[in-house]
Amino acid sequence: MDVPQINPRAPEPPYRQIAAWLRARIEAGDFPPDEPLPSEAYLVGAFGVARDTVRRAVALLRDEGLVYTVPQRGTYVTRRG
Amino acid sequence: MDVPQINPRAPEPPYRQIAAWLRARIEAGDFPPDEPLPSEAYLVGAFGVARDTVRRAVALLRDEGLVYTVPQRGTYVTRRG
DNA sequence: GTGTATTTGTTCGTATGTATC
DNA sequence: CGATACATACGAACAAATACA
């Protein structure tokens, strides 16, 4: 997967930059409802950030109701009616 | 026997997908009370999963009281009064 | 039954920048 | 000026569930 570069010094903190990218991909329908989002470990490697940062990004989307997380399985796009 | 396809990445883990299918068949009366359920070996081949996964599925139904297992005989549907 | 792998959950500690008192 | 609080980021370690061989 191809991820954009993160700028640690930008006004928008890294975890929000990552959340914005994920949000755009979700709204573009790039993640099928029965497939998990890229794992935390993958995003850590792809973005070159700490796990803490990735988890903040995902938590943001979860708070928005855009995704839900199943322990030990992954994070999935919320099915909308 | 015809079994549905399992999605290993879905939010519902494979062993629960398999349990759900067995449960539905049991409740539909597709397994006579005096006939054992399909063997572990058969289900392993039919679903294309590991034995461990099939065993978890059956254990779930056993915990629900829906079936009981007789060592060296097989797993049977519980008779309900 | 053992071993390995993946994935999320949790809890520490440390550091930095910014804002506030 | 110092002290404090907060948000952000990184690192490490372990737990628990799941899956496969």
Image (cartoon, coloured by chain):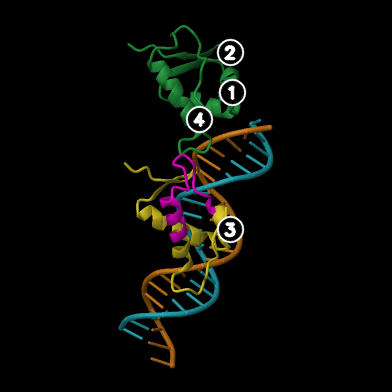
Chain colours: A yellow, B green, C cyan, D orange
Q: From the viewer's perspective, is the residue at label 3 or at label 4 nearer? A: 3
Where residue B68 appears, x then y in whole percent?
Answer: 46, 17
- Where's residue D14, x and y in %? 57, 51
Whether labels 2 and 3 share one chain: no
- Tell me the distance, in whole angstroms, between the alpha carbons under discs 2 and 3: 50 Å
Chain of the residue under the numbered disc 2 shown in the image: B
Residue depth check, mark 1 versus mark 3: number of the one nearer the observer? 3
Q: Which residues are magenta?
A: A20-40
Q: Residue at x 47, y 13 (%)?
A: B76
Q: Chain of mark 1?
A: B
Residue A78 lies in quadrant: top left
Spatial distance from mark 2 to mark 1, Cα to Cα? Answer: 18 Å
Q: Is B71 in front, or is A1?
A: A1
Are both tags, 2 and 1, on one chain? yes
Q: Which residue is mark 2?
A: B72
Residue at 35% over, 55% down: A64
Residue flagged by tag 1: what amino acid is it? Val
Chain letter, disc 4 residue: B
Disc 1 to disc 4, C-alpha distance: 11 Å
Quadrant housing residue B51: top right
In this rendering, does residue B74 appear at all? yes
Whether A35 is among the magenta residues is yes
Disc number for residue A46: 3
**N-term-proximal mark, 1 vs 4:** 4
Please tell me the numbered disc located at residue B15: 4
Between circles 4 and 2, the one closer to the viewer is: 4
Please tell me whether residue A24 belongs to the stretch shown in magenta: yes
- The answer to the question of whether label 1 and label 4 lie on touching residues, with beta carbons closer than 8 A, is no
